[in-house]
Amino acid sequence: MNQSLIKSKIFAGIAFLIMTLSFTFPMISFHGVLNKIDAGQQEEISSFQKMVWGIYNQGRYKSTTTPKDAHNNLDKMITSSSEIGVASLPIWSCSLEAPNYPKEAFPEGIPVFFHFDGFSGEVHEMNTINHYIGMDPMWRGGILEREIGIYALLFLSLIMVYFIAYNHKVLNYLMLIPTSLPLLFIADYSYWLYWFGHNLHDWGAFKIKPFMPTVFGDGKVAQFTTHSYPSIGFYCLVFIGIFSLLALLSRVKATKESDVR
């Protein structure tokens, strides 16, 4: 078999594995769990779902109000009414610092984390701050993206599997989608930041002009200092993009080599 063709399959397989472990598997495994918690149907949550959540939440941010013995234990998180985020890897993080949130009590400020299928971190507190300046709660943004996230990733997984199994020109074009995942996320994230910053309401106790929140780096909103940086999930997207691109380039090279022969 052509060496370039073999490389394309290996690179695509690595991209598929990263995407599966980082996003697809935890999203499918944890799907619907938060709805069950909100509905008081904790008994319907399987032990497998609890295990997956516990594994993927190792080392994640936990609110200062969350009892330490509840960390990584979904049952205890529910019992203590702690804020529970989704299981998939966080892609981007945003945090706020303000005088009324002292470092002693909030060493990491008020952080929230954005995932393909939801949020984690101090979501309730962030929504309270957003309300203070007349901004919509976080759930108003990316509703469609969160709804179709699982299906989109399954579609990309199918593309990669077919790319590995078959050699067809159409699949080469489709591999451009996972290659561009980091850029697609940043574009969507930037759009929603713009939407939130330019659709302020009169209910805010503190009136500010429409603004563009900081996409990357440090910024200032009213008396709040903001920090917006990629999280571990974004770096996984970058690796998925790199290996998908390597797979595509290797496949193109293999096609050219076979044409020469």
Image (spheres, helix red, strand yellow):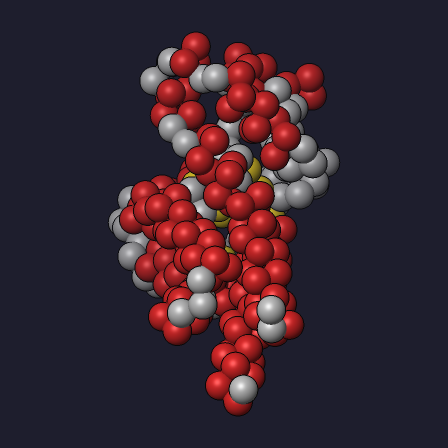
**Above or below — where is 12 with respect to 128?**
below
**Residue 59, visible in the rendered structure:** yes
Judge left or right: residue 218 versus residue 35.
Answer: right
Q: Examine the rendered structure and indicate whether residue 143 appears above or below residue 72.
A: below
214 or 51: which is nearer to us?
51
Image quarter (top left, top right, bottom left or bottom right) of the N terminus: bottom right
Name the residue at the bottom extreme. 260
Query: In the figure, residue 197 lies in which quadrant?
Result: bottom left
Q: Taking the image as drawn, is residue 213 in sight?
A: no
Q: Position of residue 114 (x, y in %)?
A: 49, 47
Between 231 and 254, the residue placed more toward the observer is 254
Eyeballing the image, is 161 above or below 181?
Answer: above
The image position of residue 143, as x and y in percent, is: 31, 46
In the picture shown, does residue 250 fall above or below 15? below
* Residue drawn where x is 31% and y is 54% of the image: 200
Name the residue: 37% across, 52% down.
Answer: 155
List x then y, in percent, for residue 98. Answer: 59, 47
Across and down, in percent, residue 218 comes to 60, 62
Q: Residue furthest front?
A: 261
Find the residue positioned furthest to the top.
Answer: 43
Identity of the residue drawn at 64% across and 37% down: 60
Nearer to the camera, 238 or 251: 251
